[in-house]
Amino acid sequence: MFTGIVTDVGRVRAVRDTNRDRRFEIETGFDTATIAIGASISHAGCCLTVVETGPGWFAVEVSGETLAMSTLDGWKEGRRVNLERAARLGDELGGHIVSGHVDGVGEVLSVESEGGSHRVRIRVPKPLHRFIAPKGSIAVEGVSLTVNAVEDDVFGVNLIPHTWDVTSLGELAAGSRVNLEIDMLARYLARFQETA
């Protein structure tokens, strides 16, 4: 489990297809001596398992399912990636509960400056849009955000300068593809209503 509070922005240093999956090596500011093999780390919202570590880097392997359901299929060397290590019992929950399971890929429609902040509008694949509500939570590229507005399959968020500066969201532009994870409570409530 994660909180959607990014603690490092890593960089893809190598991409390689193996006989099993696709392997990514990620440069990081994390102390890799403290990362156990098998540890879970959120990569732009995708929970991935560490399979190897070295000084200043670690490696993960990504299945075909994850590549098909996220933006990872397009990752190249040099790409900046929001990272968050798994939450531990007793950690501060600064964002919201995030599982690291990407529900779909959204498309950024616009990014507009608003004071010191940036207002971003994102189109959601249907039927995922029915899980998004004004003032609800959503994870975009692994970042916990508050939904400001919803109109059919488009929602808007406001990025404060801190979020813009310390995550990869500062690189968003119209046409960008982003990993989305809906709020877990919305997912379970919708499922309950379908089966009640």
Image (spheres, rainbow, N blue to C red):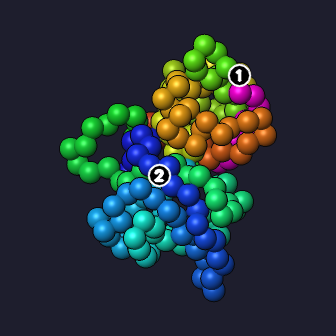
What residue is at 56 percent from the left and 58 percent from the top? 11
Disc 1 designates what residue? 112
Report the residue at 41% width, 56% height from top: 29
Is 98 above or below relative to 117? below
| 149 is within the stretch colored magenta | no
Residue 63 appears in the figure: no
Dot 1: what SS?
A: strand
Q: Amino acid at mark 2?
A: Leu
Q: Amino acid at mark 1?
A: Glu
In x, y percent, where is residue 166?
49, 38
Determine which quarter of the picture holds residue 181.
top right
Give the number of marks: 2
Seen from the viewer's position, the closer of residues 180 and 158 is: 158
Q: Nearer the viewer, residue 195 or 191?
A: 191
**Outermost left residue:** 90
Residue linked to disc 2 = 83
Magenta segment:
103-112
- Please name whichever residue, 143 or 57, is drawn nearer the observer in this view of the structure: 57
Disc 2 on helix, strand or loop?
A: strand
Asked if disc 1 and disc 2 are in contact, CB closer than 8 Å, the reply is no
Q: Is residue 110 magenta?
A: yes
Residue under the image location 44 percent in, 43 percent down: 6
170 left or right of 9?
right
The x, y position of residue 105, in whole percent, is: 68, 47
Q: Distance between the Cα atoms at labels 1 and 2?
A: 25 Å
Instruction: Looking at this view, name the residue that lies furthest to the bottom.
Output: 19
- Which residue is painted at 52% across and 24% down in the image? 160
Q: Tell me the number on the disc at residue 5.
A: none
Looking at the image, residue 186 lies above or below residue 78: above
Measured from the top left, where is residue 136 in percent x and y? Answer: 50, 26
Q: Earlier in the sequence, mark 1 or mark 2?
A: 2
Q: Estimate the x, y position of residue 56 in percent, counting from the top left.
A: 42, 65
